[in-house]
Image (tube, coloured by chain):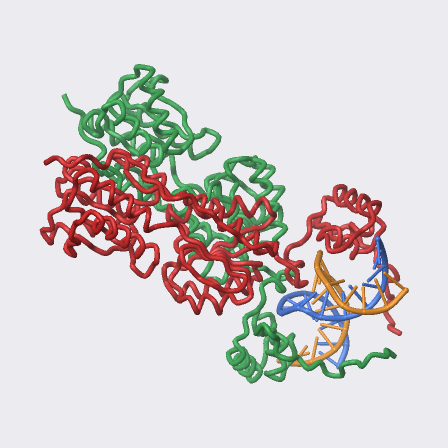
Chain colours: A red, B green, C blue, D orange
Amino acid sequence: MKDKTPPAKKALPTRPDGVVTLEQVAEAAGVSPSTVSRILNGTAAVSQAKKDAVQAAIQALGFRPNPVARGLAGGRTLSVGVVTQIISSPFYGEALLGIERELEQAGYVPLFVSGNWHEEDERKAIETLLSRRVDGIIVLAGRLADEALLSLTAGLPTVVVGRQLEGPQLYSFSFDNRAGARAATQHLIDQGHRRIAFIAGDLIHDDAVERQNGYLDALAAAGIAMDANLIVQSDFTEAGGMLAVSRLLERDAHFTALFASNDQMAIGACLGLHRRNLRVPDDVSLVGFDDLIMARYSMPPLTTVRQSVYEIGSEAATAMLGLLRGTTPKVELPQPELVVRESTRRMQR
Amino acid sequence: MKDKTPPAKKALPTRPDGVVTLEQVAEAAGVSPSTVSRILNGTAAVSQAKKDAVQAAIQALGFRPNPVARGLAGGRTLSVGVVTQIISSPFYGEALLGIERELEQAGYVPLFVSGNWHEEDERKAIETLLSRRVDGIIVLAGRLADEALLSLTAGLPTVVVGRQLEGPQLYSFSFDNRAGARAATQHLIDQGHRRIAFIAGDLIHDDAVERQNGYLDALAAAGIAMDANLIVQSDFTEAGGMLAVSRLLERDAHFTALFASNDQMAIGACLGLHRRNLRVPDDVSLVGFDDLIMARYSMPPLTTVRQSVYEIGSEAATAMLGLLRGTTPKVELPQPELVVRESTRRMQR
DNA sequence: TTGTACGCGTTATCAC
DNA sequence: GTGATAACGCGTACAA
């Protein structure tokens, strides 16, 4: 026997901070906490009468389950981690919006962490997510080696975008970058261009490689010899695009058209050309990739390959929700589509 | 007496998923869990010998404290909520990056939720954060009424950016939008412009109002009568800026210069002008506000008012860390600075 | 179908 | 200084 007064029937006083617990709901509804939990999670069948009583109590008390406690109890945290590279990038921004909107509808919250295009940062980011007990992880591109990624996320539902990977509880999908790049290059060829320069992205990424392959495909199909002097590698940023143009021009590589692997580099390239008194599209036709909002509002409006980044995000989230439900996701991304605007024109003799 | 075999000394087997708990660390170091906790949090003095032993065990086992459990135990979750409006906006993106970087150094993780410029969404966003037991909330602008915000976040450390608010555990700061707008307008006046149109942002926001005030200030100081026909209200987006130009032109409002309340609207306006065969800066001088990356790479490069959005984010995070530590934050934002590029020029004839 | 009892990993409150 | 012990709020075997 203890000497202190043992609380015979804990009173469950309303907490000062207004937080309502499941236990209070149970008491108000005249059922046990487990019954409330079962109703909440649909874990087991419950009589309609109690269901109603509990629902009423939940409404009346304004109860909201505590995700932290759920997480600890071994259940889910209703949060999914999202490994992005740079959260401030216009590209990722749109994807994150798609992810957020989609997850929200299912009651999940995204946890965004940045990999900064850096392998070690990315590993730490994922470890952070793991320690936060996320229910799943969405990885957008990234630099982490396949094996490292697989072993880190082993057992956890994972969606990888922009890379082909196989694994249990793992779903990956990509946009058809190669076809898109082919279409972009083909468009320039159709306009009569033969000297078509190319700004590649960071070739560590499949995306960048595939876009370069698409460019080469189109050249080959048109019987145009590839000229290494016309290809320059960069880093997917505006500054990088501008720099790439400088390098191209310093090589005295003559070209009448330029295909940049993404819109940001295209925008940078446009400024770079302007600095050398080269006009778009009068002197150089320019094509980008992604169709970010900035492409629509650049001067001149940029011809580019449309890939709905927002949709990629929402599809990734949908796939994740599928994995979480135990169903096998199947993402059907729309085919790449060339959007012709005002940065390209027929070659003037 | 129970009939089942009572585990006399729970064996603490290594868990299959490789997760190491504080309890295991304690056992390995030959101390009690409480002691480990104390060392981790610096809650109380511990002998150097045990400190060393525990540190060694932590290293050896690769222990990482579980933030979820910490959160439940009434401690902190080491997460701070961030209420943004649209996560995909280039403006917010840069701020979020600043917040993320700063928080990360202190071991905190940001939880981003979007308010979508919608009062009800914003309220729900904050409630989501509360239920996630965040240690504090950073609010970037937003539409929620002051009182609603105050009562929702009562007691929780809160940092509000872009609004002046008073409250316990509450810190707010703003950029000097008025001075910035004044400088922008003054620049146009200095260039000889007299008919200066203005695109306002959504006047629900202090930011937008203050920028308009700065515009009016400068006009008044120069003895230029304000012409309501030259002012049009919009929504801070590219599309809105483009639309605003149409409205301005339909009014037959003649102007030689245009000041848009933010860079995004300026970029949209630029395209709108282009569509009407008006050249920047030859026919119309254009000034934006924010100095986003897009301003540097627009065509022509945009004259704008520099406010380091990244810095605003990191300062907000620093202020939050201060509140969390119990110190009173004091944010000193740099003064607004006009960045003259190529979208403005002296008025011709 | 429903309730009891315990555990999740940590911190806080006591005693020693 | 240090170690038991009791929460924290919920999920879930297990028993009824």
Residue A76 seen in render: yes
Which quadrant is home to the N terminus of chain A?
bottom right
Q: How many marks?
A: 0
Residue A84 seen in render: no
Residue B105 image point, x, y percent: 44, 62
A340, above or below A260, in the image: above
Q: Nearer the viewer, residue B219 or A95?
A: A95
Q: Residue at x 64, y 55 (%)?
A: A67
Q: Nearer the viewer, residue A26 or B216?
A: A26
Q: Residue at x 86, y 73 (%)?
A: A2
Which quadrant is home to the C terminus of chain A?
top left
Residue A37 image point, x, y percent: 74, 54
D5, above or below A270, in the image: below
Give the residue at the far top of this rendering: B252
A157, above or below B47, in the image: above
Q: Residue at x 55, y 60 (%)?
A: A157
Residue B307 image point, x, y percent: 35, 43
Residue A267 image point, x, y percent: 26, 43
Q: Would residue B103 be found to the left or right of residue A339 on screen?
A: right
Q: Would residue B218 be found to the left or right of residue B11 on screen?
A: left
Q: Nearer the viewer, residue B319 or B4?
A: B4
Q: Quadrant of residue A184?
A: top left
